């Protein structure tokens, strides 16, 4: 779902404020409304929604990298993953992030949802390249494709992803990133749904049976 850049930037700041203390003042917006008192165990009573950065086209997939103390997030139209640190602010981290073709593709070509798996790799849903990838954040090594099709049919535009503690990945596959959305002639699947990449699917060929739709 698209959000106003300023509001989503505030949400990114809220994620950071919950994860790591910082002393640099940022402008704050809105308010935190707690409908359930159990939220007090996760969010401090004096937490504020702070704007870390703004001016993006629209942003998605914020993920806090705890061990390195930085935030990653996608600007989907700009085909870029940005990095935020308290010391350096916002800098480009990965470009292209979701479309590696030479010509124009769509108005949403870049990466969307991001997460970190139990191996410490950046897991990305890539709209333009229509795949889910893994990339080491430390120790070198390039990006690898975890999944780009089901039963030989290419995905539409993987959008959001979560990593399970058992090594599985779950991701959605709507048509948002395709040039003509649900009417795009390049669609190969009959619909859009949620998919699972099983732990033993890592390293399998593209048509590995351990990639199961649910």
Image (tube, rainbow, N blue to C red):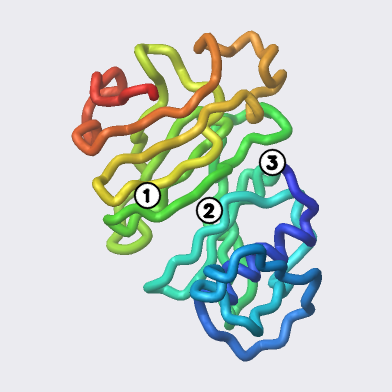
Residues at discs 2 and 3 in contact (Cβ within 8 Å) = no
The x and y percentages for residue 205 are 25, 24
- Rendered image: mark on residue 135: 1
- Rendered image: mark on residue 94: 2
- Rendered image: mark on residue 1: 3
Callout 2: SS: strand
Q: Return the residue found at the far bottom.
A: 23
Mark positioned earlier in the residue sequence (3 or 1): 3
Q: Observer-nearest residue: 151 or 94? A: 151
Q: Return the residue found at the far left.
A: 200
Mark positioned earlier in the residue sequence (2 or 1): 2
Callout 1: SS: strand
Residues at discs 2 and 1 in contact (Cβ within 8 Å) = yes
Q: CA distance from mark 2 to mark 3?
A: 22 Å
* Mark 3 burial class by Cα count in 10 Å: few <14, some 14-19, many 20+: few
Quarter location, residue 168: top left
Quarter location, residue 36: bottom right
* Mark 1 burial class by Cα count in 10 Å: few <14, some 14-19, many 20+: some
Q: Answer above or below: position of 178 versus 169.
A: above
């Amino acid at each position: 779902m698209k959000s106003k850049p300023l509001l989503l930037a505030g949400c990114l700041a809220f994620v950071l404020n919950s994860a790591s203390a910082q002393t640099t003042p940022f402008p704050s917006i809105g308010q935190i409304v707690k409908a359930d008192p159990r939220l007090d165990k996760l969010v401090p009573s004096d937490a504020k929604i702070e704007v870390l950065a703004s001016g993006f086209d629209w942003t998605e997939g914020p993920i806090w990298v705890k061990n390195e103390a930085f935030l990653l997030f996608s600007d989907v139209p700009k085909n870029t993953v940005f990095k935020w640190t308290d010391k350096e602010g916002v800098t480009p981290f990965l470009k292209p992030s979701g479309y590696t073709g030479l010509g124009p593709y769509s108005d949403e070509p870049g990466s969307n949802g991001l997460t970190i798996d139990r191996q410490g790799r950046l897991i990305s849903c890539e709209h333009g390249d229509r795949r889910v990838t893994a990339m080491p954040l430390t120790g070198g090594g390039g990006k690898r494709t975890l999944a780009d099709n089901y039963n030989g049919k290419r995905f539409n535009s993987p959008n959001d992803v979560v990593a399970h503690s058992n090594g599985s990945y779950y991701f959605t596959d709507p048509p948002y990133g395709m040039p003509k959305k649900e009417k795009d002639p390049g669609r190969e699947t009959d619909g859009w749904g949620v998919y699972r990449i099983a732990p033993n699917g890592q390293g399998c060929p593209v048509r590995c049976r351990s990639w199961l739709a649910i």
